[in-house]
Amino acid sequence: MNFICNFPCFSIVLCIFGGIISSALKGRAAKYLNAFILAVVAVMSACVLGYTLQTGESFTYVMGRFPAPWGNEIRAGVLEGGMALFFSLIMILSLFAGREKLNEEVDPEKMNLYFIMINLLLSSLLALVYTNDLFTAYVFVEINTISACGLIMIRQTGRTIEAATRYMIMSLLGSGMLLMGICMLYDMTGHLLMENIHANVQILAESGQYHIPLMVTIGMICVGLAIKSALFPFHTWLPDAYGYSTVSSAAILSSLVSKGYIFLLLKIIYRVVGFDVIYGSRVTDILFVFGLAGMIMGSLSAIKENDIRRMIAFSSVAQIGYIYMGFGLGTQVAVVASVFHILSHAATKSLLFISASGLVDASGGSKKFIDLTGSGYRNKIAGVAFSVGALSMVGLPLFSGFISKLLFAQAAVRNSGKMLPTLIVLAISTILNAIYFMKTVIRIYTPVESEYPVIPVKRHKVFGLAMVCFIALNVFLGLCSDLVIRLIETGLSMFA
Amino acid sequence: MSEKKTHKQKFSEWFYGENDPFVAAMPVQEQKEHQVDEKTLQEYEKERAERHEKVFDIAHNGKIRAFRRSYRVLGVMMCLLMISILLLAVSYLPRTGNPANPDNNEVSRVYIENGLQDTGAVNVVAGMILSYRAFDTFGETNVLFIATCCVMILLMLDEKALHTSGLSNDRFYEPKNDWILQKIAKILVPIIFVFGIYVMLNGHISPGGGFSGGAILGAGMILYVNAFGFKKTQKFFNETVYKVIKVGALCIYGVLITYFFFMGANGLNNHIPLGIPGHILSAGLILPIDVLVGLEVACTMYAFYALFRRGGL
Amino acid sequence: MGANLLSNYGEAVAMILFGIGFSNLLFQRNLIKKIIGMNIMDTAIYLFLAEKGYIAGRIAPIIIDGDQSVERYINPIPSGLVLTGIVVSVSVTALMLSLTIRLYQRYHTVDLDKISTMLQKEGR
């Protein structure tokens, strides 16, 4: 077995070690340790991606001496390696860009606790990406929840603590349903490893035994994960949590935390229950309807907002609706579109949050639109970055948002039943996105006399560099989308 | 105003933007600032205050009361709907206690029949969670760790605030050095500690293990702190000791578990002696991991108590 | 309704408790009652798992007298899952309670709706 096959296990354990050691270090040492660990994890994930592309198949790694179904296993393929690499890149860029705000907003005594949260969040995301066992997935979903809560409340204002409370309540509802679903699935199949459950579920689906409990179980697992990733009616905690936490937290939360749960749902659809059984159970129709509703209601709420960060947070609700709409459409092409949208949304949303913080800094710390007028001239790099993010969200060609909308429309056309609602809602939501994003872009580029100081790029070099990297990532996803789509398709073919 | 121009001139004027299509082509009014008189402004303010009071006057707002009643009814109905769906699912599940259930399959058979030889533990459950499914237990230990860190973010006060906070909350009025509590604690605390250590060390031979043993140890420490106060406890358990034990235990646990995974996945023999089943020094890695997990859980329980009560260790 | 409702009475009770706990967590306004609802919901899942492991007439899976035959012991897997679940539940309860303490120290109420109202009055 190649040494590279150890890398998934090493990356998970390395992040956990980083978290443990950071609890004994001071703030600055914890920051450097965290940067080092992120770099190493990115390199290891790139190696795993290269290795699986070369061999053309995914490999399983036995955790301990005992193979499945008696022991625990992790599995890595093209899609998993690519996702791990992408997550670690976004985390590196978000942390670099938000470094100065972090020093201002977080108590220096508690800075090392923040980096513990980041390390454990990365470890739980990697474990969710690589795992091949349902119960391990549940344990790491809990680590994900608690560390995301820690990221929100590190800032310790009244609003963030109330937002963290609401977030925990909603997340615990989702966790409870997920655990009950896993236990009932174990009861009917007798296994916890994903491939073994799949074999048994196929037998059960064909024989028709335990039909009703199987449907209820699939429903509970899907609804539980949908609650945790803030699908439409369960999104009330999102604007507060993203809008008032510190900037790196908002970027990491919006790009990465929900995506871990969505990736787990993808695994359950492909590897545990099987494509046919899930689409035969009509649970995905519910996800489809809620996805469509989320796309429209999220954008409508964003139009009404007066605070730039809450507006971007509501836009997240709409984008998660897109991803669930893709899952609900029920074809392979639609799932490819959803996975591409995961990547595109992660890159764009963190870009938007960080550039919005740059614009807010150039307006004396006020987040209201009236004070943000003309801030594009005061902080040039943030203005350009925000415009790039906004244009990508609206769907201008050259940026990644256009490719994902194109893929969704292509997938919808091939599905005869759901084509019409999907295309209509896609069109309406593009117009709504254009309304609030273009309004903001025009406003930040309106020249106005103001007393706020101009922030030169030279003073915040790291911020500028991170912005340029984000823009480059977005343009790369927009221009070289063929390469990325082919990687996703290869990954999905070896995913099941 | 313009003489006859050639097409080329008109085109170049349009191209370079020198031609303003609105000049002398459209009547334009003078722009003046929008004036609102004082009386209208006052009316706006009064209306806004009234609206504010009406919306936020929760006690007398009739609509809010009706909403609350219907919210309760709707909540109960949703609860009943959910329970009925789940009961429907349960009624079709396999019968409890039936040996031919789907979950009594080859997995549990191998655990019971080969568990003693593979792991060296007499307690099959301890062998299962600490060697067959060791990754889950590692994750679970980290859940405890990260929950402690989150509680520290919220409740930990620094040195200065710790001294001044005692007066501000009602800890000042708590009875200290209660005679009955101290006498009973002098007898009970050693017994509890010994029992906790016994449960921790015997995880692989009898029911017990790191988690239960650690919880018992933590309970003993909480009793001690309640009876004798924080000053006496800080002589042997303060923040430095806590950090050393916690970081040390978790690091050693991580190193052992990584060694176990690495050797196992690469097919190498991990040279850990399994010993004679039934003896204390047996079952390979299970005994050290139980001790480490127990120490960590004891520290966590005590830390939760101390942070909730005082804001610091 | 299927045939096994009365013989699965333990699981039926677990489902009723799960529903009660879930609704409490979702609909109650008082934060302490929400946390109690969450604990009821988690305990119901452990009851369900404990019922699942049981086989009639067999004893707990601690090997006695070297007898390793399968017919003597119950299924050990659900017990391991319950161990993990209990630890997770304790951690999350501690976290929620500390959030409640911080909110109470600042707003002097544990009613989540009143806290939202106070935040709205502070001006969003």
Image: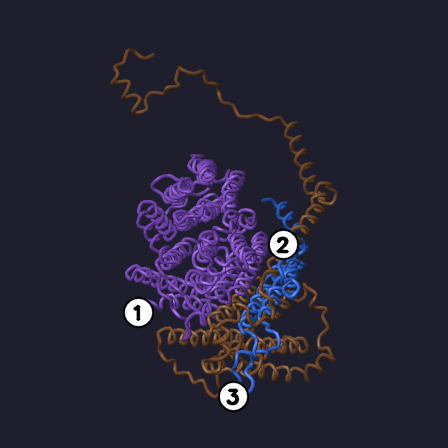
Left or right: C98 with respect to A205? right
Query: Circle 1 — which element?
Result: loop
Task: Give me the chain that's brown.
Answer: B
Q: Residues within 10 Å of mark 1 (few under 14, many from 20)?
A: few
Q: Residues within 10 Å of mark 2 (few under 14, many from 20)?
A: some
Task: Give me the chain that's purple.
Answer: A
Query: Circle 3 — which element?
Result: loop
The chain that hosts pointer 1 is A
Left or right: A201 with respect to A85? right
The amino acid pointed to by label 3 is His
Q: Nearer the viewer, residue B166 or A230?
A: A230
Respond whether the residues carrying marks 1 and 3 are from the same subunit.
no
Query: Circle 2 — which element?
Result: helix
Count of labels in the image: 3
Task: Give me the chain that's blue.
Answer: C
* Labelled disc at residue A2: 1
Respond whether the residues carrying marks 3 and 2 are from the same subunit.
yes
Q: Is residue C36 visible?
A: yes
Q: Which residue is mark 3?
A: B279
Do tag 1 and tag 3 residues touch (Cβ < 8 Å)?
Answer: no
- A462 vs C74: above or below: above
* Labelled disc at residue B82: 2
Q: What is the CA distance from the residue labelled 2 to the residue labelled 1?
A: 50 Å
Q: What is the CA distance from the residue labelled 1 to the residue labelled 3?
A: 39 Å
- A221 vs B187: above or below: above
Do tag 2 and tag 1 residues touch (Cβ < 8 Å)?
Answer: no
Percent x, y of residue B157 = 58, 65
Percent x, y of residue A168 = 57, 57
